[in-house]
Image (spheres, rainbow, N blue to C red):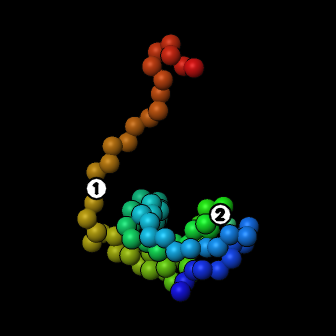
Amino acid sequence: MMYGYQCEYCDGTVEERIVTEDFRHKGELVILHNVPVGICNCCRTRYYNAKVLKRLEKIAVEKNELPTLSIPVGEFQWPEGERP
Ligand SMILES: [Zn+2]
């Protein structure tokens, strides 16, 4: 069990959740599915197990072998004269 301990910031419990993580490796965005992170069931603080971090790093280093997505990137802006 990698998680299941008490949160450092509140009385909540850190529970394992399988999530999709967006993170940067050497300035490049890498998205990984099925990452086991610890999330406090009370304040939602995230915890990363050291072995999970090591593994994330290893997968990121080999990112050239991963499939890639093209992602639309835009800027938020209000239409002319409609800024609230
Ligand atoms: Zn907490």
Up/down of 76 relative to 53, above or below: above
Element type at mark 2: loop
Looking at the image, residue 52 sits to the left or right of residue 63; the answer is right
Q: Is residue 41 visible?
A: yes
Q: Is residue 28 visible?
A: no
Residue 45's x, y, as percent? Answer: 63, 64
Residue pictured at 38% horizontal, 76% vertical: 59
Q: Label 1 amino acid?
A: Leu
Residue 8's x, y, as percent? Answer: 72, 72
Q: Label 2 amino acid?
A: Cys
Task: Assess whether mark 2 and mark 1 are in contact (beta carbons under 8 angstroms).
Answer: no
Would the CB of label 2 be found within 8 Å of ligand 1?
yes
Residue 69: numbered disc: 1
Looking at the image, residue 31 sits to the left or right of residue 43; the answer is left
Up/down of 42 relative to 5, above or below: above
Residue 12's x, y, as percent? Answer: 68, 69
Residue placed furthest toward the bottom: 1
| Picture mark count | 2
Element type at mark 1: loop
Residue 83: numbered disc: none
Front one among 83 and 43: 43
Residue pictured at 64% horizontal, 73% vertical: 13
Q: Which residue is mark 2?
A: 42
